[in-house]
Image (cartoon, helix red, strand yellow):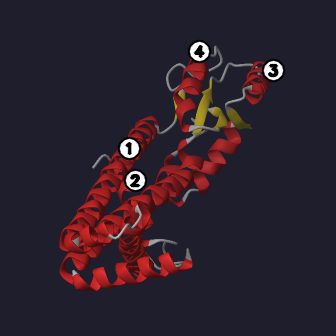
Amino acid sequence: MLRNLKFALNSAWQSFWRNLAVSLAAVLSITLILVLAGVNLLVGHAFSQVLDGFRTKVSEISINVSDDTPLQTVSDFQQQLTADGRVTSVRFITKEEALAQFKADPQNVVFAQQIEGNPLDAKLEVHVKNLGDVAAIDTLARRWPGVDPADPTNYQGDFVNRMLELSSWLSLAGVALLLILMIVSVVIVMNTIRTAVYHRRKEIEVMKLVGATEWFVRGPFVIEGIMTGLIAASIALALLVIAYPPWPRTCSWRGRCWVRWVATSASDGT
């Protein structure tokens, strides 16, 4: 058994160097495919992490409370939302607290000086677990009698929809791309093996005439295919590590910066 394995390894190595041009073409092609697959996975992972980073902001809904709504009504609705499995937390902010928050924001310094009285509503800040449930909680809030009819809720609905849609499309595109790359890589390896078989056809005929088993004949070609894949995988992994080193000051992965730019562009409507 060990003798046959040693023969298969030696034959595969000799065949690899004997058909060096074909072998290198296969290695380079598979390397490119694996690099593309790796980039696809990295971008998908980076987008998922960026989406998690935005989740805290975009999954928050502010429910503006009408001035004539009794505190008991607000408290009852707050308890109803807290008991909802889709909600993470609910916080009630009074008119005074809302005004203090508005004035504390450096972007509102000019407007804060021009405000007379307190035109802001009290509000309920609701944090939702999943982005997909934001719209449902918004609908529930708008049906509550205590909501301000002029300005019922505030949340980044358009941005949430863009993020969900982009996430779905990227997931589908990623899966489709991986399947295509897998098929192409298998075809390349098969063609490489066929080329090697063609160049060694006379040797194979002699081996069969002297009674060689099927495994003894096929073994070197199988090992050559595995060897080609391992070399390509090693090169692809090295290239990915070099191209995407840790980048702690800005992003842990460079690909994440690109995805963050895409997400920011989506939120800006570009």
* Disc 1 to disc 2: CB gap under 8 Å: yes
Query: In the displayed structure, does residue 267 sit left or right of residue 148?
Result: left
For disc 2, the neighbor class at 10 Å (few under 14, some 14 to 19, many from 20) is many
Which disc is residue 166 wearing? 1
> What kind of element bears circle 1?
helix
Q: Is residue 249 above or below residue 131?
A: below
Q: Amino acid at mark 1?
A: Leu
Q: Who's the residue at 36% across and 42% down the image? A: 169
Q: Amino acid at mark 4?
A: Arg
* Disc 3 to disc 2: CB gap under 8 Å: no
Whichever of labels 4 and 2 marks the residue nearer the N terminus, that label is 4
- Dot in front, 3 or 2: 2
Residue with the mark numbered 4:
143
Residue 213 in percent (x, y) is at 41, 64
- Dot in front, 4 or 3: 4
Residue with the mark numbered 2:
263
Whichever of labels 3 and 1 marks the residue nearer the N terminus, that label is 3
Whichever of labels 4 and 3 marks the residue nearer the N terminus, that label is 3
Q: Is residue 236 above or below residue 105?
A: below
